[in-house]
Image (cartoon, rainbow, N blue to C red):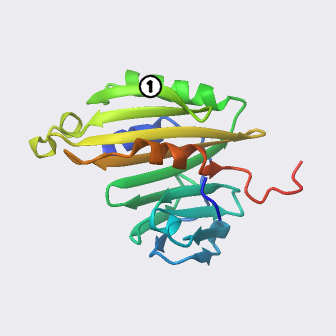
Amino acid sequence: MKFLKTLLLFSCFIGSLSGWAAANADETIYFTGKSFQDKRDGIQFIRPEPPEGDEFFTISSSHFHYFLVLPYSDEWRFTLDDTSLLRGTCGAFNVTLLARESDETPEQVLKQHKSYILSNPKTKGIKEIEIIKHGGISVLRNTVDLEALSGLEKYRGFEIRHFFVARKWKRELFLLHLSKTVSPGEAFLEDKHLFMLTKGFDVDFMREGEQ
C-alpha cells in the first residue's frame, strides 16, 4: 500500500462541537504494532511493510467509512465512546475524529473553530493560530505554549502543536484533530503531520455503490 490535548484545550474543543456523531460504544482498543481487525465499528489496523511501516500505520472503519494515517508506535490506545467516532493517545500524540450532518463546508467549520478558540476566555498560551493550505486542503494550525496554558514552570519551552482538518461526504461532515506535545529543542517535522492530515485522511472508504 502506498502512503499518501493539553486536556484543557482539548476539552474546550469537544465542548465547542456539540451535536457531533459518536460511536455507540465505550471500549478501548490497543494497537501493539501488528495488523488486525476489530469487529467494533469495523475497525482495521494495518502496519505496512518497512520502511513505511516504521513511520506510519493506518486505521479504517468499514462502518463509518473513514481512513486515517497516523505516526507509528506500538503503544497507541484508542477509545470508542459517546464523544467521538475515535479517540486515541500515545505518549505525546493525541487524535480525535468527530462527525455530524451539516450543510457547512469544511472551510466554514475550520473558521468557526478558529473563532471559538480565540473567543474562549479559558484559552491561554496561543503562539500562533491560522488556517493554511497544504496540497490544496485547508488545515487549522494552532501552536500553544504549554507553560502559559498550564501555569507550570516545569513546562517552560514545551509547545503543543494542534492541527484540524475537515472532510465532507454529502451531508456527512468529519473533523479530524491531531496534536503533539513538542519538547524544548525537539525537531518537529510539520510536513509529515500535514501529510497525514491531508493525503492520509479520507471519508469515502468502502462507499462503493452509495448514491
**Where 131 falls versus 207 (above or below)?**
above
The residue lying toward the viewer, choosing from 161 and 211, is: 161
- Image coordinates for residue 68, horizontal then vertical, percent: 58, 56
Q: Which residue is mark 1?
A: 130
Viewer-closest of 15 and 36: 36
Residue 124 x %, y %:
27, 30
From the viewer's perspective, is residue 12 above or below residue 64? Answer: above
Q: Number of marks in the image?
A: 1
Q: Quadrant of residue 110?
A: top right
Q: Residue furthest front?
A: 51
Residue sitting at x 57%, y 47%: 98
Return the x and y of residue 162 as percentages of the image width and height: 40, 40
Kind of residue at disc 1 = Glu
Residue 193 shown left or right of residue 1 in the figure: left
Q: Is residue 177 left or right of residue 209?
A: left
Tag 1: Cα neighbours inside 10 Å, few (<14), some, or many (≥20)?
A: few
Q: Which residue is at the front of the view, 123 or 108? A: 108
Residue at the spot 60% in from the left edge and 57% down from the top edge: 3
Res 31 visible:
yes
Residue 79 in percent (x, y) is at 48, 63
Quick one: SS at disc 1?
A: strand
Residue 18 visible in this rendered orientation of the protein: no
At x 49%, y 51%, the residue is 96
Q: Quadrant of the N terminus?
A: bottom right
Residue 115 lies, with reference to residue 63, above or below; the image says: above
Q: Residue furthest left?
A: 153
Q: Is residue 189 left or right of residue 187?
A: right
Tell me if residue 18 comes above or below residue 192 in the rendering. Answer: above
